[in-house]
Amino acid sequence: MLNHEASPTAVVGALNVHVEGAVVAIVVVPRSGITGFAGLESDAIRVRLAAPPVDGSANAALIRFLARALDVLRSQVRIVSGEHGRRKRVLFVGMSQEELGQRLHTAGAVR
């Protein structure tokens, strides 16, 4: 279920604490023509990517997009699971769950 009109707290279901920071659940839609946030889908944030899922280009595009959108270094963003699938868990190193949720809200991941 896709939810475009979520409250700022709705993103909490997509977030988890990790030993190294905070993790967000992402559902990727590759070959979308444009890259950007596309709301919430169940317990994950939906991200459209212009890049195709070939030779890791969609994963690289996802990391670049998230780092730029959330104003963090690319080295702070790592895919911890789901490298070969649409559902991914992305780690933000050194960031609390609360800070990640706020940055996602500010970036427009949830509206």
Image (cartoon, rainbow, N blue to C red):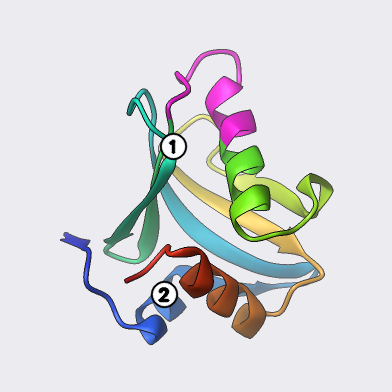
Residue type, label 1: Thr
**Residue placed most toward the observer, 97 or 107:** 107
Q: Where does residue 44 sit, x and y in percent of width and height?
A: 38, 61
Q: In the picture provided, is 109 more to the left or to the right than 77?
A: left
Q: Which residue is mark 1?
A: 35
Q: Earlier in the sequence, mark 1 or mark 2?
A: 2
- Seen at 65% across and 80% down, the residue is 99
Disc number placed over residue 93 in the picture, else none: none
Range of magenta residues: 50-61
Badge 1 element:
loop
Q: Where does residue 21 sit, x and y in percent of width and height?
A: 75, 70
Q: CA distance from mark 1 to mark 2?
A: 19 Å
- Seen at 44% across and 37% down, the residue is 35
Farthest residue to the left: give it.
1
Magenta stretch containing residue 106, yes or no? no
Using the image, determine if residue 28 lies above or below residue 14.
above
Q: Quadrant of the C terminus?
A: bottom left
